Amino acid sequence: AQTVTQSQPEMSVQEAETVTLSCTYDTSESDYYLFWYKQPPSRQMILVIRQEAYKQQNATENRFSVNFQKAAKSFSLKISDSQLGDAAMYFCAYRRRRSRLTFGEGTQLTVNP
Amino acid sequence: ETGVTQSPTHLIKTRGQQVTLRCSSQSGHNTVSWYQQALGQGPQFIFQYYREEENGRGNFPPRFSGLQFPNYSSELNVNALELDDSALYLCASSFTSGATDTQYFGPGTRLTVL
C-alpha cells in the first residue's frame, strides 16, 4: 500500500523568508502524481501544486516550487517570500491515475510577522 | 473557489441516527470522491464514484454508502452513527480522462455525533 510521510508536524517562518516542507512516500508504481494541498482554518482544501512522476522538471507555481526526487521518493515544497496568508496546514498527497488520494499527516505552518 | 459545494456546513446527530451529506461537483466533472478527516489528521479516502458507479472504496464499513446522480452531484449516507464518525467530511470532484484528473475539494461538512 502507498504511504505518505510528513516528518515535520510544525514549521515556522518569518514573513518574506523561505521555508521548505518535507514529504516522502512509498510506492511500487511508476506512473503517479504528487500534490501539495493547503488547508487554512476555514478547512477548505486548496490545491497548491501538482507534479507528474514522469516529468523530470520540478513544478513551479509563482512563489511555490517543489523538489521532486523520484529515486529517493521525496517531494518537498518550497515557499519563497512567505506571506501571512500562507499560514495553514499543508498536506502532501499521492495518487495513481484515476485512483484515490493518499494524504500525509500534515505540517502546520506558522508565518511570523 | 473550486466550484464544488457541500451541504450542510455543520450537522449534529446522536449515536445510532442516520445522516445524509450532499455534494455538488464542479461543472464538467464526472468523478466524485469522499474523504473523512478526523481532527488533527489527514483525510482518509471513503469511496469514489465515476459515472454513477462506485469504482473504489477505502477501509470503511458498509454503513457508509453513497450515490452519484446523472448531474454528477453526490450523496454520502452514514447509518447507525458512532461517536468516532465525528469528523470533517470532504467531497472532491474531478474530470476523469486520459490526462491528469486533479481533484478539487468542497468546503466540507462538519459532523458531530453526540
Image (cartoon, rainbow, N blue to C red):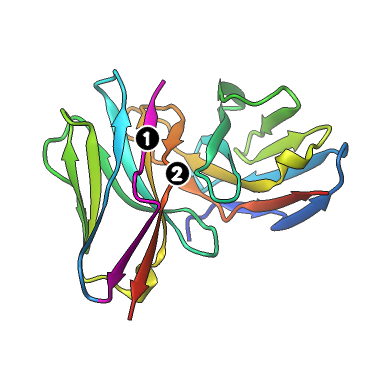
Above or below: residue B14 compared with residue A53 = below
- Residue A91, position as x, y percentages in the image: 40, 48
Which residue is painted at 63% across and 41% down in the image? B73
- Foreground residue among B106 and A77: A77
Which residue is painted at 30% across and 74% down in the image? A83
Quarter of the N terminus of chain A within the rendering: top left
Amino acid type, callout 1: Val
Chain ID of residue with mark 1: A
- Foreground residue among A13 and B65: A13
- Kindly tell me whether residue B101 is visible in this rendering: yes
- Kindly tell me whether residue B99 is visible in this rendering: no
Q: How many marks?
A: 2
- Crowding at dot 2, Cα within 10 Å, few <14 / some 14-19 / many 20+, comes out as many
- Residue B74, position as x, y percentages in the image: 65, 38
Dot 1: element: strand
What label sits on residue A4 in the rendered view? 1
Amino acid type, callout 2: Glu
Q: Is residue B42 magenta?
A: no
Single out the residue that lies furthest toward the left: A57
Q: Is residue A9 left or right of residue A52?
A: right
Which residue is painted at 18% across and 40% down in the image? A68
Dot 2: element: loop
- For label 2, the residue is A105
Magenta segment boundaries in residue numbering: A1-15
What label sits on residue A27 in the rendered view? none
